[in-house]
Amino acid sequence: MTKTEGEHGPGPLPEEGGTRRGIIMLMAVVLITAVSAGTIGGYYLSQGERTGALVSLLFVLVIPILAYILYRTMIDPYYRRLEDANLSLHIKQEELHDTRDDLFIKFLGIHDVNYAANSPRQFPQRLKDVADITARVMNADVCLIYRHERKQDELVLAATNGYRQEAVGMVRIPAGQGIEGWVARRIEPAMVKDFVKDGRFKEAPGLALSSYATVYCLPLYVYSSGALMGIIELLYSRARSFSDEEINFFTTLAGILSNTMQNEQLQSELRKMNQELEQWVTEKTEELRASEERYRTLVENANEAIFVLSEAGDILFANEHAVRLSGYGKFDLVHKNLQEIATDAALIRGMLADTVSGGQALRNGSLKRADGAAVPVEASCVGLTLLGKRFIQCVLRDMSAYVRLEQKLAEKEQELAGLRQQRGS
């Protein structure tokens, strides 16, 4: 940072240094002349030469007159200029202190705005806090914050510093209309004195802006993403200009607020997506639960023994008919492998392998009951997907009645064959 004049004082100007040296030299000459004249007068007086002594005395009397003339013409103006320079330096120091205090106030304002914009309060209340702080730091009568709705392409009043609070959410300005719409459309600031006479001005219903004189409006625009978030507007009852410090503060504040509003918008969209996802998951879960209930009802009431197996053949589920057919309890069944209750384990392994590879398997075999009896069955295996996981559904149909019927048919055929043989003999 460069050294300012108020910090170390102004250095002596070259002409001031020359004037100072000239004054000192003249004063030295006057003093030397006075001493010399007094010495000469004393010498003449000691020698008894009264004429020389009177001349010397007269010269000594002339010296104060010359000194006074020297003071009035050179010394007094020099010190007056010096006093003026000191006064100017003091004024500049006061101005520097005022500027420093103003910058400190602006710095505190930026800190307060950043804290208010990112506090844990509800977003509408945060925007109102920002409007309050901005109006206070910028000495504005009114601060209005609008948010931009992309679908309708219009500005909606989102917060004020207490001015016309009932208009929040009600005032809507289409982009391109009024000074606010012009700022939003052009992405440019607007500082207008006597803005009511400006051709872009259009009164917003419910705000009565025409009673103010000066407007300062900035777009809330995120340049990194090219997103218009809204605008912020200051209103003053008197015409006024803005210092560089005020412009820098307001511009910095607009940047902070733009990013805050974008983050809030993204979080709102994320919350909406999460709610939609949760609703979708809930609906799908209900559908799956209903589907599982229908499946369970059909399976439990089926006339065949139905097993749900892992791809290794472990029994994960068995219906009531499977319990009756095998003679095992449900708890015992779900701790067994299907090969353990089959008389031919190799047959079951082959069926599982065929099903895992993507096909279906149909075999005739026998089931080994808990009491040791063998039950002839027809086994059918097919792949099944539940909750994104692969399983195998195995259906065992009891073939005991069919086998008994075949046995009876075979016995009848033997009897018929015996009768034919007797008749033929």
Image (spheres, rainbow, N blue to C red):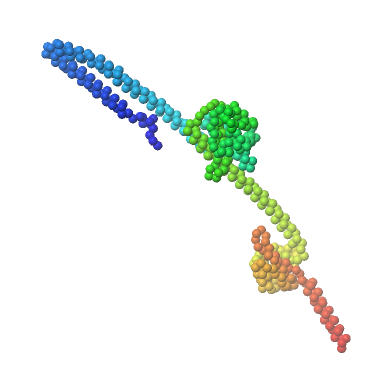
Can residue 80 be spotted in the picture? yes
Q: Residue furthest right?
A: 423
Residue at figure coordinates x 77%, y 62% from the top left:
301
* Quadrant containing the N terminus in the rendered view: top left
Q: Residue furthest left?
A: 47
Residue 120: x and y in percent read 57, 40
- Residue 297 picture quarter: bottom right
Residue at figure coordinates x 56%, y 28% from the top left:
194
- Residue 6 picture quarter: top left
Q: Between 269 and 22, which is closer to the camera in this rendering?
A: 22
Residue 197: x and y in percent read 58, 28
- Residue 196 picture quarter: top right
In the displayed structure image, the side of residue 123 where residue 306 appears, left or right: right
Residue at figure coordinates x 74%, y 62% from the top left:
299
Residue 375: x and y in percent read 74, 72
Residue at figure coordinates x 80%, y 76% from the top left:
407
Residue 392: x and y in percent read 68, 65
